[in-house]
Image (cartoon, helix red, strand yellow):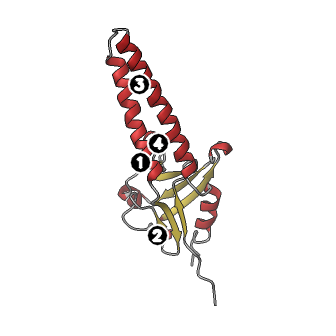
Amino acid sequence: MALELKTLIVRRSRRMAGLNLLFASGVFGLAVAVTWQAWQQGESLGASLLFLAIAAFWGVLMGQQFRDDSPKVAIGKDGLEMPGVADAPIDWDKIEELALGTGIRALGGGRLDIYVDPETYSKLKLGNRWMGDLIVRRPGTKPGFTILGAGLDTKPRVVFEAIRRHWPLPRD
């Protein structure tokens, strides 16, 4: 009797989201101070109010990400699940290539590049790095996406090894 492989569930890293929120709060505080100083000196507030609005938007976004505990990636025998990115699990036979990228170790390091067939790729709703999304479009000519490791609670190597337990499928 073979053991059924457990599903690996990957979430956003609370540590990294907390650091981002702390940094965004500091930038917001700086924006408030700059706006206050400009107002006290009777200077134009246009640029400082724009800076304040951007900092507030960033702070709200980081606060939402800090509170977000939903699964970002789930790996199991049914395929690769990415809630919010793919409506259904990506079947293992749709994955064409995996590549483990490197990154800065202190920041959680690395990324996982996954190349899929064009039909699957066209159905994905991939995010943007600048908005803090963890699953983003992969630049290049081959259809693929990247799972960014710095924002995850699980190292990319662990995710890579979990996928390798199911993929590649045995060929006849």
Does residue 94 lie above or below 170 as drawn?
Answer: above
Q: Classify mark 2: helix, strand or loop.
A: loop
How far is the residue under mark 3 from the one under mark 2? Answer: 49 Å
Amino acid found under the numbered disc labelled 1: Gln
| Mark sitting on residue 91 | 2
Does residue 52 lie above or below 127 as drawn?
Answer: above
Residue marked by disc 3? 32
Q: Position of residue 60 (x, y in %)?
A: 39, 41
Q: Residue furthest front?
A: 40
Question: In this rendering, which labeled residue sits more in front, label 4 or label 3?
Answer: 3
Residue count near mark 4 (Cα–Cα under 10 Å), binned few <14, some 14–19, many ≥20:
few
Q: Earlier in the sequence, mark 4 or mark 1?
A: 1
Q: Earlier in the sequence, mark 1 or mark 2?
A: 1
The reply, left or right, for residue 114 in relation to residue 90 is right
How far is the residue under mark 2 from the one under mark 4? Answer: 25 Å
Residue marked by disc 4? 129
Amino acid found under the numbered disc labelled 4: Arg
Amino acid found under the numbered disc labelled 2: Asp
How far is the residue under mark 4 from the one under mark 3? Answer: 26 Å
Amino acid found under the numbered disc labelled 3: Val
Q: Position of residue 71 (x, y in %)?
A: 47, 62
Question: In this rendering, which labeled residue sits more in front, label 2 or label 4?
Answer: 4
Q: Earlier in the sequence, mark 2 or mark 4?
A: 2
Question: In this rendering, which labeled residue sits more in front, label 1 or label 2?
Answer: 1
Q: Classify mark 1: helix, strand or loop.
A: helix
